[in-house]
Image (cartoon, rainbow, N blue to C red):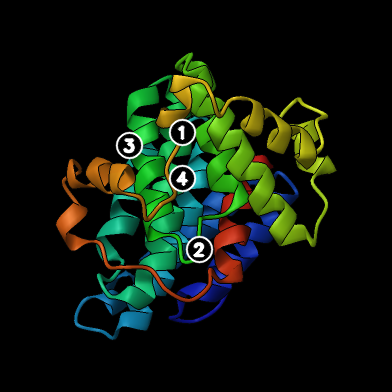
Amino acid sequence: VGGRTAEPYEKFAMFEMTRKNFVEAQAVLLRGAQAVADLSIGGDGKSGLTLAHLLHTWGVCEYHLGSLARAEQLFDDALRVTGSEEGDSSMRSLVLYSMSRLEFARGEYLLAQHCVGLSLKENLLPGGNSLIWKLWHNIAKKMENEHLATRCKEQALLRWEEERGGTVSDLSRLLGERQRPRDYIAAKSSASSNENNQRVLPERTGSVMKDVFRKTPWYSKICPPSGRMDKNWYAGAKLWEL
């Protein structure tokens, strides 16, 4: 496929995956990992990051092939070779998102929630993105936490509106609800006299959310996010929808 850099292997494998040729993609990713694995040892940060992307793509490929244990190992490897600098936040967020998707598929909803929360913390877009909030909404529904599910749905719709330039109809259908954004505003206003409104989902910078992350083993190593999420995040996350 292409020399001693991971990117050509990953791109070709992603192409095969979009055609649902997961076995062929698996073979390409294996060859790519064998060709470039040593470059991340003692190499620059870019080498480790491109290898992390390849390992992440391979992990999603293994998921589609039904090998969940192998997918978990590859996600662990991808996180291990990802740097700890602020510039690596996008990759860390993507791997943690995929870890959450994997645990969700296994029915391990507490672990899934743990990972999606970390993914949100690493996400460079202010307030996260719609895919992260949509996943958290699905997790909360499975955990029968309707209050949290409602707040996550609201955030997902708001982020989708921002990302798509003001329309929320497509995501509303994906979430199984046809309410307009003004319905959420009205519902939020009508609940203002209810004592339960003190338990609304905080923004990612809120004190309650910070308390959640202080309980995670990686809290002390997470850098404050800034900037914007790059397109590779969305490309990697969309592999789950194939």
Residue 98: mark: 4
Query: How far apart are the alpha carbons under marks 2 and 4?
Result: 20 Å
Residue 64 can be seen in this image: no
Please report the residue visible at 46 percent of the width from the left and 33 percent of the height from the top.
200
Dot 2 surroundings within 10 Å: few (below 14), some, or many (20 or more)? some
Task: Find numbered disc 4 in the image and state the secondary structure of the residue it sits on.
Answer: helix
Q: Tag 4 or tag 1, which sits nearer the N-term? A: 4
- What's the residue type where badge 2 is placed? Pro
Q: Left or right: where does residue 156 sit relative to residue 78?
A: right
Please report the residue visible at 58 percent of the width from the left and 28 percent of the height from the top.
150
- Image quarter of residue 241: top right
Task: Find numbered disc 1 in the image and state the secondary structure of the residue it sits on.
Answer: loop
Residue 126: mark: 2
Q: Nearer the viewer, mark 1 or mark 4?
A: 1
- Image quarter of residue 170: top right
Badge 1 is on which residue?
Answer: 200
- Image quarter of residue 182: top right
Q: Nearer the viewer, mark 1 or mark 2?
A: 1
Dot 1 surroundings within 10 Å: few (below 14), some, or many (20 or more)? few
Query: How far apart are the alpha carbons under marks 2 and 3?
Result: 20 Å
Query: How far apart are the alpha carbons under marks 1 and 4?
Result: 26 Å
Query: How far apart are the alpha carbons under marks 1 and 2?
Result: 18 Å
Residue 193 percent across, percent down from the top left: 53, 24
Badge 3 is on which residue?
Answer: 114
Q: Tag 4 or tag 2, which sits nearer the N-term? A: 4
Q: Left or right: where does residue 35 sit relative to residue 224?
A: right
Please report the residue visible at 45 percent of the width from the left and 60 percent of the height from the top.
123
Task: Find numbered disc 3 in the image and state the secondary structure of the residue it sits on.
Answer: helix
